[in-house]
Image: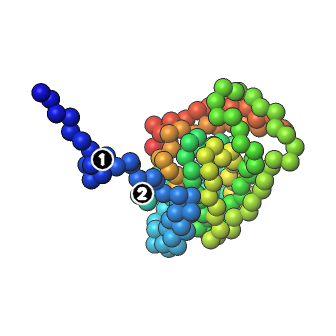
Amino acid sequence: MSVSPSLTPSAAVAAPAPGPTQAELLDFVRRTAGDAELIASLPLDPEGRTWVRLEGPGGSEAWLIGWPPGTGTGWHDHAESVGAFLTASGELKEHSLTARLPTDGWKTLELTEGIDRERRLRAGKGRSFGRHHVHEVLNESTEEHAISVHAYYPPLPQIRRYSRSGQVLRLEQVERPADWQ
């Protein structure tokens, strides 16, 4: 005779706890950007961006990034991750798309008019964003470095990079964590 165990509420397997929300990630990058000692510790390179990985809240991935004058990310998204970033010093500019793009199965898209957004993020200003957010971030200064703090959850599974010519967006490359860590 076999007996099947019964599950009581205390014996049931709990669902995994959800990760940090966009608001919690924004709060984290705001607090981290306020750590003057940490911000000053980032080595700055006059030629290219520098970055240091940080411990983010609730299993998130976080980065402290230095932006020399005239540098930027190019158009990209963070796949299934939500995120937040905040400028700790200097000023960054973000171009983004307000439309949600298909996630897979395309190489070229014709974008409709009116979906472009632009934000200037001076020191202390930041934003959060949802999954599949397509944007580019730039330091347009000709003289001053910018420093920012970024956080993503879940940790970035991939970054899709795009080229853009007018209203045409093309998928150019898919990067995995081994490509940037």
Give the class, few, some or many, for how many residues have Cα within 10 Å of label 2's Cα (few <14, many ≥20). Answer: some
Q: Residue at x 55, y 46 (%)?
A: 81
- Residue 100 percent coordinates (x, y): 71, 42
Disc 1 marks a residue whose amino acid type is Ala
Residue hosting label 2: 58
Q: Percent from the top left, x then y, of residue 180?
A: 50, 42
Q: Are the two marked residues, 1 and 2, in contact with CB atoms closer than 8 angstroms?
A: no
With respect to residue 150, does 76 lie above or below? above
Q: Is residue 112 left or right of residue 132?
A: right
Where residue 26 appears, as percent x and y from the top left, is 56, 63
Q: Nearer the viewer, mark 1 or mark 2?
A: 1
Q: Is residue 155 above or below residue 176?
A: below
Quadrant of the image containing the C terminus: top left
Residue nearest the viewer, comparing 2 with 72 = 2
Q: Between 162 and 11, which is closer to the camera in this rendering?
A: 11
The residue that appears at 57% across and 50% down in the rendered structure is 82
Specify whether residue 17 is in view.
yes
Q: Residue at x 85, y 40 (%)?
A: 112
Q: Based on the displayed image, in which of its 4 quarters is residue 129 positioned?
A: bottom right
**Outermost left residue:** 1
**Amino acid under label 2?**
Gly
Secondary element type, mark 1:
loop
Nearer to me, 133 or 34: 133
Q: Looking at the image, is mark 1 or mark 2 earlier in the sequence?
A: 1
Closest to the observer: 101 or 140? Answer: 101
Which residue lies at the image location 47% right of the left edge and 47% below the top edge? 155
Disc 1/disc 2 C-alpha distance (Å): 23 Å
Residue 144 visible? The answer is no
Q: How would you rate the neighbour count of disc 1 (Cα within 10 Å): few for under 14, some for 14-19, many for 20 or more?
A: few
- Say left or right for 79 vs 179: right
Q: Which residue is identified by label 1?
A: 12
Left or right of 8 in this view: 163? right
